Image (cartoon, coloured by chain):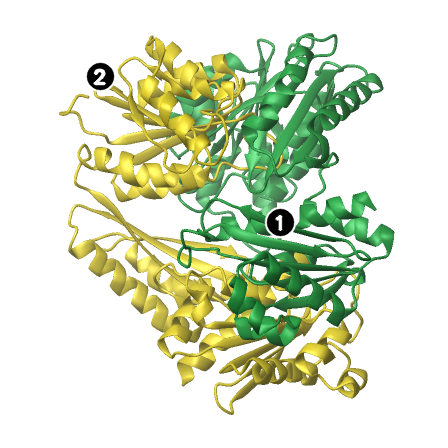
Chain colours: A green, B yellow
Amino acid sequence: MDPGASIRTAQIIAVGSELLGTVRVDTNSLYLAGRLGGLGIELRAKSVVGDSRDELARLFRDAYGRADLVILTGGLGPTDDDVTRDAVADVLGLELREDPALVEQIEARFASRGLRMPAVNRKQALVPAGAEVLPNPLGSAPGLLLAGGGKLAVLLPGPPRELQAMFERLVEPRLRARTARAGLYRASLYITGQSESHVEEIAQPLYSKWRTAALPIETTILAAPGQIELHLCARSEDPDSAPRVLAEARDQLARALGAGVFSIDGRTMEEVVGELLRERAMTIAVAESCTGGLLQSRLTDIPGSSAWVAGGVVAYSNAAKVLFAGVPPGLIEHHGAVSEPVASALADGIRARLESNIGVGITGVAGPSGGSAAKPVGTVAIAIAGPEDSRLVRTVRLYGGRTQIKFSATQAALDMVRRRLLAQ
Amino acid sequence: MDPGASIRTAQIIAVGSELLGTVRVDTNSLYLAGRLGGLGIELRAKSVVGDSRDELARLFRDAYGRADLVILTGGLGPTDDDVTRDAVADVLGLELREDPALVEQIEARFASRGLRMPAVNRKQALVPAGAEVLPNPLGSAPGLLLAGGGKLAVLLPGPPRELQAMFERLVEPRLRARTARAGLYRASLYITGQSESHVEEIAQPLYSKWRTAALPIETTILAAPGQIELHLCARSEDPDSAPRVLAEARDQLARALGAGVFSIDGRTMEEVVGELLRERAMTIAVAESCTGGLLQSRLTDIPGSSAWVAGGVVAYSNAAKVLFAGVPPGLIEHHGAVSEPVASALADGIRARLESNIGVGITGVAGPSGGSAAKPVGTVAIAIAGPEDSRLVRTVRLYGGRTQIKFSATQAALDMVRRRLLAQ
């Protein structure tokens, strides 16, 4: 190892044809991203490659030329399609030799289960010249660590439990000794009811200055269903000032973006609303039509929500609107089921029947059919009754497919409840 | 384009710093892997890179040198950190020019929502010289297609809905004209109420023979929340016999696995149950407690579900159970809220009130608190009342966190409804 060179950047390569299909994703890289971030090592890119020795060798060569640290996961098993050892040895020009101590360990592992070691498992005892063996206490595939030219290559088995145990016990201490002191710090804001470009227009003049500040801050804008996310990230050797500078930047953005910012600590909208209700010892009841139960399901995803969720109804049919929320049939005939008066009557009715502080009524057109020129797919009327005599009614126009419209409608309703509670 | 060269291999690059963190995974590549497989195009590798123009340019240069087709997803937005257009133009040495027709389209899109186009969105009208613009009917970021030297680069926006619509309408027809004949064929089975190892024990003797059959079939078993999936896959140049052989294999597995197989055509449980109800012109009503509206939300995720979902209640509190489903208060006191008699009363009560053919009652402990020695977290009582005088009551013991228990409980309830309808 070259003890002087410090490790600043990393790349991850996950090996396995099953990770190139339609179902499985490489989740090890999510875990590793978190551990690397904690060490102040920047993950520059990650890749997935099938069980092809040539393809893997090319990718590894490229990654090893660019990043200080390359972590390869998977492909260390005993079978023909396990090619990681060979590909890495190819690229680094190292000979593979059988390690007798390793053969013994693998044999002992099988013997402890009353089995003899299958011949194929001998392959797992092959070690590139000069490599350090990382014992695997939970599986038969040992890991490998190769150092040279100020760079590090780490080979770990694919099963998450084995990989994580080995990373934390064996790899992290070695990395810690070779990382700069700088840690990676993060802050984030979640905004609803505004478009990505609108957020960008307000945020860009602020964060463009921070890129070149004394402590540079990188900002990423992300559009997710029902919300826009702003992620701030800074690298610093000072564990005191960095979080403070980031928090100041975050708060400055929050002030500029106004009431649409619903979370500055990673909490979801339903967590934020649940917490506001809990603090005020208030309860909420819901009569929802087009969202079909999703609003109540989101509210009850939060542990302890039985303290503030009174329950409610899915008033999908007009009969259910009348029966469970006491909506006057004449109101539906006169204004149509998708209308602000009906949303109000749903909110009032469910609030009165469940004696809750707040009642929510939602009625709309989730599509794909059922729209009209006056009320196209995505038209949703939302009413909030309470607390006390307050009332809020809005009609929103939402976009996307059926499930996206359902989600966005629940997000708009939760945001109306949030603002109403904050205004108290 | 070079019309002679055929497209055999592909690589995917997902662009976005948020995909290098600890939470988000690139799911577009799973979708694209499936579509490419259907075209007989082999996905060789996939990568994720942050919003760095240089890093992306290096990865793209490497991928474009190796694969016939490179698909880049994301990074086509209007903001500073959207770098895909620039990086690809850098590598291919193409000048970016503003396309006036595109500016007009983006302006019109904003105008249709009563908004003016923010200045930053002009960036989305920049087109590399010689590129074909792929219109995006669902978002403001157009895609781009660049052809040359027998290769193809396709740039698509990151939001899955936009990407999928554009891939199927605009990209797939172009690829189909340039692919070899051998296609990838798939079949799948979805099983509920059985463990992964149980399914494996029954399925393994069958599929192990198919690996070496005249048309070899690869089988993957996957455990997902509430279900086990078996995916069969074969590659063949014969578009007639391959689907037949796969269908035979799938049906053989379905017979061996029995009534737990709920789908052999990719439909979800809520689609299967919705279709059974639609065929029988029956309606369903739900009174759910611990699942908090999720069962009704799943039922109403299906377009047209207003024909068979009568609605229902989230009877989260005991008061709501009494008020909306007529559960006798004495029954709750005597047996406890989480009990088969209360589940039955919920099912009967909601069925009677909404005059539906089927009533479902669910009551349980979703956790993390609220469990007891007799009724630990994960205990859920489920009752199905109807059609006619039939009745089914079960208590299940589910595992996992709060949202997983909620989901598994709705899956068990839907499966009970499915079996009841099939037994008719």
**Residue denoted by label 2:** B149
Q: Is residue B339 visible?
A: yes
**Residue placed most toward the observer, B347 or B65:** B347
Horizontal side, residue A228 vs residue A185: left or right: left
Residue B12, position as x, y percentages in the image: 39, 30
Residue A306: name its quadrant: bottom right
Pair 2/1: label in front: 1
Specify the subunit that label 2 lies on. Answer: B
The secondary structure type at the circle numbered 1 is strand
Specify the subunit that label 1 lies on. Answer: A
Residue B203, position as x, y percentages in the image: 40, 64
Residue A100, position as x, y percentages in the image: 56, 32
In the picture, the quarter occupied by the N terminus of chain A is top right
The secondary structure type at the circle numbered 2 is loop
Residue B158, position as x, y percentages in the image: 46, 33
- Say if B289 sits above or below A224 in the image: below
Question: At label 2, which amino acid type do we have?
Answer: Gly
- Could you classify mark 1 by the number of other residues whose Cα lies within 10 Å: few (under 14), some (14-19), or many (20 or more)? some
**Residue placed most toward the observer, A138 or A332:** A332
- Say if A310 sits above or below B152 in the image: below
- Say if A375 sits above or below A83 in the image: below
- Residue ranking furthest to the bottom: B389
Horizontal side, residue A348 vs residue A48: left or right: right
- Residue ranking furthest to the left: B4
Question: At label 1, which amino acid type do we have?
Answer: Arg
Residue A394, label in figure: 1
Q: CA distance from mark 2 to mark 1?
A: 55 Å
**Residue placed most toward the observer, A13 or A338:** A338
- Say if B321 sits above or below A177 in the image: below
**Residue placed most toward the observer, B327 or A301:** B327
CB-based contact (under 8 Å), mark 2 and mark 1: no
